[in-house]
Image (tube, rainbow, N blue to C red):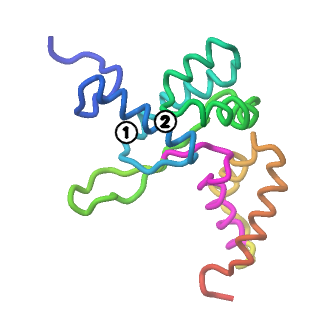
Amino acid sequence: MAGGLVRYRHLSRKSSHRQALLRNLVTALVQHESVRTTWPKAKETQRLAEKLITLAKRNNETSRRKATGILYTPHALLPKLFGELRKRYAERPGGYTRVLRTEPKSQYDQGDSAILELVDGPRDLRFAMTAAAVARDQRLGRPSNELTLRNRSKVTRFRPGGESAFDSMVEKVAGLRLGGRV
């Protein structure tokens, strides 16, 4: 039968290899909170990571066993998953990860690259970039544009102490004096 709905990306791998790849990427994501990979792998890993964090939010024995089956090093990462990450995303209704497209990693194949990161974490790239844009606007004495204001509301909405953390990040970036102008 030709055509039909594809339920997931096959990533040019057989089933066992694909599952091992996704488990490895999710384990690295929980451990480092940011992973650089190709865009299709990042989108498939995002699906599994969202399910894993939802399991952590349930916080019962069944969800712990399922999470143990997904992570490669559960003894090291279950306390982080069911402790820090569960508390961080307790109020968030979903959307725990973000995929950002980047320049290709390899000049040879020019494949689409991406960064998969956990939102509201210490390595949140959108938070830092929005703070840099606000610091630049303040330095130049102009009001922030609509996109910057929308990004500011997005990155501070579910973050505990969001506005104060954002203001301190703006001050920190302003102290770096990026851009070369006074």
The amino acid type, in three-letter code, at marker 2 is: Val
Magenta residues, start to end: 116-137
72 or 129: which is nearer to us? Answer: 72
The amino acid type, in three-letter code, at marker 1 is: Lys
Task: Measure how far apart labels 2 and 1 are at the Cα level.
Answer: 11 Å
The secondary element bearing badge 1 is classed as helix
Marks 2 and 1 close (CB-CB < 8 Å): no
Task: Identify the mark at residue 10; answer none if there is no mark.
Answer: none
Task: Identify the mark at residue 26; answer none if there is no mark.
Answer: 2
Percent coordinates x, y for residue 5 in the rendering:
30, 17
The secondary element bearing badge 2 is classed as helix
Q: Is residue 115 left or right of residue 148?
A: left
Percent coordinates x, y for residue 50 in the rendering:
55, 29
2 or 32: which is nearer to us? Answer: 32
Q: Is residue 125 magenta?
A: yes
Q: Is residue 42 left or right of residue 137?
A: left
Q: Mark 2 vs mark 1: give the one in front.
A: 2
Q: Is residue 171 left or right of residue 30?
A: right
Question: Quadrant of the rendered structure where residue 132 is?
Answer: bottom right
Quarter of the image where the N terminus is located = top left
Percent coordinates x, y for residue 74 in the rendering:
56, 30
Instruction: Tell me which residue sits at (60%, 81%) in the image.
Output: 179
Quarter of the image where the C terminus is located = bottom right
Give above or below for 61 relative to 68.
above
User: Which of the marked residues, 2 or 1, is nearer the chain's N terminus?
Assistant: 2
Instruction: Tell me which residue sits at (35%, 39%) in the image.
Output: 40
Pointer 1 residue: 41
Q: Is residue 128 magenta?
A: yes
Give above or below for 27 relative to 144.
above
